[in-house]
Structure formats: C-alpha cells, structure tokens
Amino acid sequence: MKKIIKCLASSALLILSTLVFANDAAIEAGKTRAAVCIGCHGLQGEGKDAINGQPAFPRIAGQIKDYLIKSVNDYKADKRNDPMMSAIAKGLSDSDIVNIASYYSSLK
C-alpha cells in the first residue's frame, strides 16, 4: 500500500512539474513573439498613448490568459474590428496566440 501511495505521489509531482515547465516554455516563446505587440501595447503590455486619461492602446499585462486568446482569435476571425489588430492577428498561428497570451498574463 505504501508503494502505491509513493508511486501516485511521484506521478502527481511529475505531472505538475511538466505542466509548470510547459507553461514556462510558452511564456518564453510568447515573450519573443510579443515583439509584434510592443509598438502599441508597450514593452511590458502597459498600454500607450493616453488620451483624456484613457490609453489609446489598452493595458494587456496581467490580463486573463483565456480572455487574451479569445480576443485575438476574434480579431483574427473578424468578429472584432480594428484594422491594426485584425492584420496582426491574422499573421499569428494558434500556438503564437497561446504563447503571447501566456506571456502577457504572467506579467503584473
């Protein structure tokens, strides 16, 4: 019985460490690919060019990963309309979108 518990515990730790490593890899890949975002959203996703107290380009740092993925996919599918975002989104692969979202959601 103790062997089974140790085996299950070891397996759980291995799975968790694999998930953490995969997320870290996605964040690093996203950081590199996010170069297309910096011009509008800033070096750290902080948003840029305030107009009347509102950023012309929104802050995306710390945003929820799934929200970022959905938003970019909506621009890609023309469900949301912004000429710049739509053009950029159409040039991103599904994995690019996930990686970029992982990166920006990891920022605070």
Image (cartoon, rainbow, N blue to C red):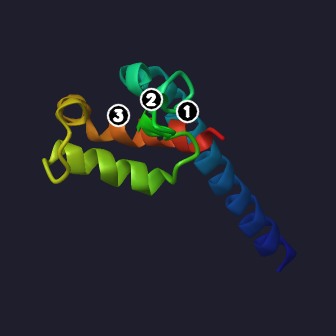
| Residue 58: quadrant of the picture | top left
Residue at left offset 73%, top offset 56%: 13
Q: How crowded is mark 3: few (under 14 residues within 10 Å), some or many (20 or more)?
A: some
Residue at left offset 40%, top offset 48%: 68
Image quadrant for the N terminus?
bottom right
Residue position marked by numbered label 3 in the rendering: 96
Asked if the residue under mark 1 is in contact with the one under mark 2, i.e. CB atoms within 8 Å, the reply is yes
In the image, is residue 32 above or below residue 14?
A: above
What kind of residue is marked 3? Asp
* Comparing labels 2 and 3, the label whose residue is closer to the camera: 2
Residue found at the very far front of the displayed protein: 52
* Residue 14 in the image, given as x and y percentages of width and height: 68, 52
What kind of residue is marked 2? His
Residue at left offset 51%, top offset 26%: 31
Image side of residue 62 versus residue 38, left or right: right
* Residue 59 in the image, given as x and y percentages of width and height: 50, 39
Which residue occupies the foreground of this view, 53 or 1?
53
Secondary structure under the numbered disc 2 in the rendered image: helix
Asked if the residue under mark 3 is in contact with the one under mark 2, i.e. CB atoms within 8 Å, the reply is no
Q: Which of marks 2 and 3 is nearer the N terminus?
A: 2
Secondary structure under the numbered disc 3 in the rendered image: helix
Image side of residue 78 versus residue 99, left or right: left
Q: Could you give the CA–CA distance between mark 2 and mark 1, rounded to whole angstroms?
A: 6 Å
Q: How crowded is mark 2: few (under 14 residues within 10 Å), some or many (20 or more)?
A: many
Q: Residue 46 carries which label?
A: 1
Secondary structure under the numbered disc 1 in the rendered image: loop
Residue position marked by numbered label 2 in the rendering: 41
Image quadrant for the C terminus?
top right
